[in-house]
Amino acid sequence: MDNYYSLLGIDTRASPQDIKRAFREKAKRIHPDIAGTTGREMRRLLIAYEVLSSPERRSEYDRAYSRFVKSDSFDYRAFLKEDTDDPARRAKLIFFELLHLEEDEALAVWRKQGGLHFPLEKYLDREDWMDCSFILAEELEKRGRYYESFSLLVRVIREERRKPYFRHFLCEVESFLKELVRFKLKSAVDDETYVSCMENLLGLGFSPKDEARWMRSLAETLLKLGELNGAETVFREALKRDPALPNTIRLRRTLKV
């Protein structure tokens, strides 16, 4: 198993300059746009660099390393699994398993800790939490857990709006969320939950046309639930955002808008 030092191709005595230089050289070789590798490989390299370039995080990592090194082989997973009652170590284990392509193990730990109720942001650095949440969302979507995937993506985008981290990569995050909403979410949840999901999408900073489509769907669901006044209010707001909103004939007739 790679540890962060071997991932960067340096030894444990590397200076901050050595770490930065090694990261830059390896990043050039494995960057998806250059080498055709996956974004996950690049994220693994980034997390190794972030840990080793931070004196405090590197010190913590080195202490663990010195305890578990055996024949020059460090088992960081064993260190993280050592204390099952420590939520911070559980959070780091989830992220570690994801980065090492042990997705089923990561999801099992995440679920045992409470799933969506487990505050990863409390125990991981902000960047680690956002990366971890996005990868979790990817894996949950693959397993048909669309509501959980949706909820994590909303949290990530809301935090990104507050303070950018993903930046250019955000387009991929947004596209992922929009495709999930368009094709999979509605059939996976009950109507009340769907209404809550649509309300959570509004105000996240998407385009007026995106919001109009979601509000049309929200109005249709409210109408189905018998909430005529709410449906009319939402539908009028949708038309303000996009007067040319398609597929509205039935709603216009029913709501007399």
Image: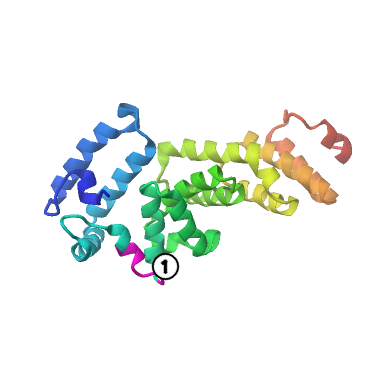
- Residue 7 % position (x, y): 24, 45
| Residue drawn at the location 74% of the way across and 36% of the way down | 239
| Res 59 visible | no
Seen in the picture, residue 222 relative to 117 is either above or below; the reply is: above
- Residue 187 % position (x, y): 70, 44
Among all residues in the image, which is located at the extreme bottom?
Answer: 85
The residue at which mark 1 appears reads as 87
Residue 84 lies in magenta, yes or no?
yes
* Count of number-bearing discs: 1
Seen in the picture, residue 58 relative to 23 is either above or below; the reply is: below
SS for tag 1? helix
| Residue drawn at the location 40% of the way across and 63% of the way down | 90
Residue 154 appears left or right of 166: right
Rendering quarter of residue 256:
top right
Among all residues in the image, which is located at the extreme front?
Answer: 71
Residue 212 lies in magenta, yes or no?
no
Q: How is the image coloured?
A: rainbow
Seen in the picture, residue 222 relative to 82 is either above or below; the reply is: above
